[in-house]
Image (spheres, rainbow, N blue to C red):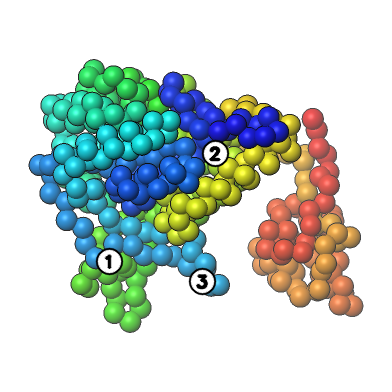
Amino acid sequence: MKIPGNVDLTIDFCGLKLPNPFILASAPPTAGASRIKRAFALGWGGAVTKTIPPDSMEITDVSPRLKALRNDNGSIYGMENIELLSPKPISLWLDEIRDIKQCFPQNLLIASFMAEVRKERWQNMAMSLQKAGADALELNFSCPHGMPEKGLGSAIGQDEELISLITSWVKSVASVPVIVKLSPNVTDIGLMALAAEKGGADGLAAINTVQCLAGIDLDTFEPQPSVNGVTTFGGLSGPAVKPIGLRCVAQIAQRSRLPISGIGGIRSWKEAVEYILVGASNVQMCTEVMLNGYGIIKGLTEGLTQYLKSKGIDKVDQLRAKALSKLVNHGSLNRSYRVWPDLNKGTCNACGRCVVACRDAGSNALQITDSKLTLDIEACDGCSLCINICPSLKQSDPRGRCN
Ligand SMILES: Cc1cc2nc3c(=O)[nH]c(=O)nc-3n(C[C@H](O)[C@H](O)[C@H](O)COP(=O)(O)O)c2cc1C
């Protein structure tokens, strides 16, 4: 997608070209050809199919299988799901993949799949999906519900040997790039990325959902989402998981040379840029699309274009990993750098919230005297609690900044 003003949103992922870096993640918005085609028509660069299981695996979803987590103002900051894989037979998917590729040859279609830990199952599925026209294969080693109790999904993604083994099985028959989707539900995702690399993966995708328990109904004592009185642990997605996804992608980029598709809590072009800045070459989105529809792609591409123009950058890839060298060990952080609230900036109404916070959890450096906020700068140890809790308190120019 060439945008007037010399900004080029096209990207390369594992040697494949995409019109822009925005890909629909494997989830309900990619549950079939009619949905994916509608999304491509609106401008999405690529799509990963809902994970396709072998016909031998019975998939029966429960109801309800979603639970939104809301802020006090009602806005959704996260969503738990306990949805399983695609319930459609593979023969139907093969027809749908052919159909999508025939209608949209320029868009990237990645087939996500999962099978029992049997070599011929993974290999047969890989060969069928690529023969039908999938541009790449995504191995789902990361679903945190339903599958792990069968030794699949994130149970594979938590085992370095299995990650390498299954990836190598698929690689040995694959004629298209193989992408491994990693789970955040591990102690060190960098090690899992290296295991995928060892198995021959061409690219990585992270993160899948974060294992969670959305809440408990205080009247009925039923954990949510309640399926006739009981539930199971599920997977958290949406804005709440973005800091986890960003951390995971940065840790993967620090360890692995493979291209990364960044996923988790992306709502706008801004979070997409954050993922690219820590090393992703493109991003995948699910929850935001479930909440607001495919039409958000217009704002995503326009916002990214304007941002690149404002930075004088003409190609998305020039942003990649620009923030990575700024992630260092804690021991390397500058101890003489210090910030404090600048009381000359902002519009303090002397409500006193920062005073209480500073007294009970900070350094007791703030007071209200004659209805005016004052700061004892010598007592302030620069923790930044006040600046974080009060929208009108502004940060000072730092003291002791060394370049
Ligand atoms: C209802 C639902 C179903 C999902 N199904 C799949 C799936 O079949 N395969 C898969 O790899 N990920 C699946 N995911 C995970 C998403 O692809 C994505 O990794 C995750 O939701 C984080 O991205 P987000 O915060 O943009 O939603 C699903 C997520 C949701 C919410």
* In this view, 146 is above or below 106: below
What separation in Å lies between label 3 and label 2 (alpha carbons)? Answer: 27 Å
Q: Residues within 10 Å of mark 1 (few under 14, many from 20)?
A: some
Q: Residue at x 21, y 58 (%)?
A: 61
Residue placed farthest to the bottom in the image?
A: 219
Marks 3 and 2: CB-CB under 8 Å?
no
Tell me if 380 is positioned left or right of 122 in this view.
Answer: right
* Residue 278 image position (x, y, % from top left): 56, 34
Answer yes or no: disc 3 within 8 Å of ligand 1. Answer: no
Pick the residue in front: 346 or 23: 23
What separation in Å lies between label 1 and label 2 (alpha carbons)? Answer: 32 Å
Q: Secondary structure at mark 2?
A: helix
Quadrant of the image containing the C terminus = top right
Answer yes or no: disc 1 within 8 Å of ligand 1. Answer: no
Tag 2: amino acid = Tyr
* Residue 32 image position (x, y, % from top left): 29, 47
Q: Which comes sooner in the sequence, label 1 or label 2?
A: 1
Residue underneath mark 3: 74
Marks 1 and 2: CB-CB under 8 Å?
no
Residue underneath mark 2: 275
Tag 3: amino acid = Gly
Tag 1: amino acid = Pro
What separation in Å lies between label 3 and label 1 (alpha carbons)? Answer: 20 Å
* Residue 133 image position (x, y, % from top left): 29, 29
Q: Secondary structure at mark 1?
A: loop
Q: Residue at x 68, y 40 (%)?
A: 307
* In this view, 101 is above or below 371: above
Q: Residue at x 29, y 62 (%)?
A: 65
Q: Residues within 10 Å of mark 3 (few under 14, many from 20)?
A: few
Q: Residue at x 39, y 31 (%)?
A: 105
Tell me if 344 is positioned left or right of 295 in this view.
Answer: right
Residue underneath mark 1: 64
